[in-house]
Amino acid sequence: PGPRTMPKTVKAKKPAASAPYKNSKKPQNPLFVRAPKNFGIGNNVLPQRDLTRFVKWPKYVRLQRQRRVLLQRLKVPPTVNQFNNTLDKNTATELFKFLNKYRPETATEKRDRLRQEAEKRAAGAAATSGKKPLFVKSGINHVTQLIENKKASLVVIAHDVDPIELVVWLPALCRKCDVPYCIVKGKARLGKLVHQKTATAVALVDVRPEDKGAFGKLVDSIRSNFLDRYEELRKRWGGGIMGIKARHVTDKKAKAVAAEERKRMG
């Protein structure tokens, strides 16, 4: 017998190569020619992105943002929380329009007024009445004296004074002396009113006879929002608002507990 040989394997035939790809491009409209951009180095400029989350903000910005978040998360006592309850936008606009009529004179205006009075006296004219013009009074010490002496007709307090201890006692003093007060946004707006950068509080002592009707309506509206609700605001705590992730976790747990309860009951 001859040597053993391996059985021959039948090779599978390779499929025939497919026909080359036919270029079946539609004719382009010459009015709308595609011009794809190349964002490689030295080519087209990349579009602007919102890089807010990647910015290393200055320390004061980070601190004020962290403070704002902390005031939302932690429980805030009613004395501090009352400064979150500010005057509504429409009433505040009316109030600032009214106060704008009683802006105090600048140093230049005061100097000119006194010079004119002095010139009149020197010329032998009768001296004008010694009453000062009616203006908005500013400065925390001056405003406090006006409230204690019950001379103030209306007190306007800024909501964002820092440190808050400067004005935290002012609403209680206004209530004790029965002086109408309101809390508005914000200290820069009050400062602009009295030619300063910021102002903690301003007060009106008196108004002109032609403005008494409008002022009375304004004071009634403010009194009903603040002075008459003092006892309610005195007991209202603030804060305790968790972040969106924490709220989602709490909701998920509540749903799981509810599902477990339904399964046990049914």
Image: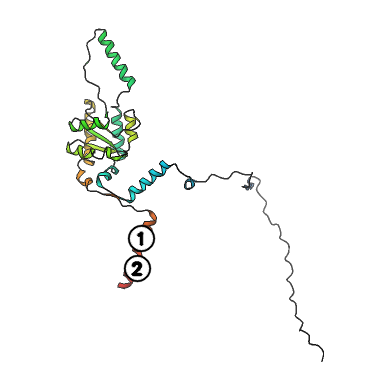
Relative to 141, is 31 on the left or the right? right
Badge 2 amino acid: Ala
Specify the farthest residue to the right.
2
Disc 2: CA contacts within 10 A as few (<14), some (14-19) or many (>=20): few
Image position, residue 171 (x, y; %) = 23, 39
Specify the farthest residue to the top.
123
Image position, residue 84 (x, y; %) = 30, 44
1 or 2: tag closer to the N-terminus = 1
Q: Nearer the viewer, residue 249 or 266?
A: 249
Mark 2: secondary structure: helix
Question: Residue 259 has which mark?
Answer: 2
Q: Indicate the quadrant containing the N terminus: top left, top right, bottom left or bottom right.
A: bottom right
- The residue tagged 1 is 251
Quadrant of the image occupied by residue 216:
top left
Image position of 167 with respect to 3: above or below: above
Q: How many marks?
A: 2
Disc 1: CA contacts within 10 A as few (<14), some (14-19) or many (>=20): few
Specify the farthest residue to the front.
59
Q: What residue lies at 25% left-to-right and 10% top-to-bottom?
A: 121
Mark 1: secondary structure: helix
**Which color mode does the image show?**
rainbow
Badge 1 amino acid: Asp
Q: Is residue 214 visible?
A: no
Image position, residue 152 (x, y; %) = 21, 31
Q: Indicate the quadrant containing the C terminus: top left, top right, bottom left or bottom right.
A: bottom left
Q: Nearer the viewer, residue 152 or 54?
A: 54
Question: Residue 210 has which mark?
Answer: none
Q: What residue lies at 27% left-to-right and 10% top-to-bottom?
A: 120
Q: Is residue 145 visible?
A: yes
Q: What's the distance in space between the residues labelled 1 and 2, CA to CA?
A: 12 Å
Image position of 192 with respect to 263: above or below: above
